[in-house]
Image: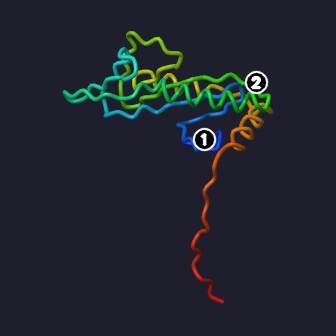
């Protein structure tokens, strides 16, 4: 799993959300963080409305960053000759997603469908496969790494 990886694409750093590489597919996940028990309305195009505690907040439609993420992953996989399907998932663990009018390609997971979704993920017993390792290597080749030396306590010598 890559959590908010930063990729270096065409001489520019780009931060993405979550990428999970399974033996059978690559899953691009977008974590839709809303207020607890809020409701997201998906029918408003470029923006989704979040209804919580009597207020309405506009949120950028997660399909927009999701498209960028899947496009980058597909480009990297294609350049390295790796053929794994790319799946899109939008996850709102503490909220409800009102699906009326939703015509997107991403699977919507909210607090109502989260338990069944988690159970389905647990039931995937497939072992690590070569394509999974190749996909991880291809993605890692394009990530930026920031590191620093740890401050170590002085030794008693």
Per the image, the residue denoted by label 1 is 2
Question: Secondary structure under badge 2?
Answer: loop
Per the image, the residue denoted by label 2 is 83
Query: Which image quarter: residue 21?
Result: top right
Residue 148 percent coordinates (x, y): 60, 64
Q: Is residue 81 left or right of residue 61?
A: right
Residue 65 percent coordinates (x, y): 50, 30
Q: Residue furthest left?
A: 54
Quarter of the image with the N terminus in it: top right
Question: Secondary structure under badge 1?
Answer: strand
- Spatial CA distance of label 2 from label 1 is 19 Å
Q: Residue furthest bottom?
A: 157
Residue drawn at (42%, 25%) of the image: 61
Residue drawn at (72%, 24%) of the image: 84
Q: Is residue 135 left or right of residue 72?
A: right
Residue 147 percent coordinates (x, y): 61, 60
């Amino acid at each position: 799993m890559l959590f908010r990886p930063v990729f270096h694409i065409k001489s520019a750093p780009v931060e993405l959300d979550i990428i999970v590489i399974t033996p059978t597919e690559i899953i691009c996940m977008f974590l839709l963080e809303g207020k607890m028990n809020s409701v997201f309305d998906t029918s408003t195009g470029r923006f989704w409305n979040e209804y919580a505690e009597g207020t309405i907040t506009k949120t950028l439609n997660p399909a927009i960053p999701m498209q960028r993420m899947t496009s980058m992953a597909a480009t990297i996989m294609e350049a390295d000759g790796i053929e794994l399907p790319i799946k899109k998932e939008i996850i709102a663990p503490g909220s409800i997603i009102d699906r009326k009018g939703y015509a997107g390609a991403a699977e919507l997971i909210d607090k109502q469908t989260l338990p069944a979704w988690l159970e389905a993920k647990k039931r995937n017993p497939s072992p690590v496969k070569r394509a999974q390792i190749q996909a991880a290597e291809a993605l890692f080749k394009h990530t930026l790494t920031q590191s620093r030396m740890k401050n170590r306590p002085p030794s008693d010598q």
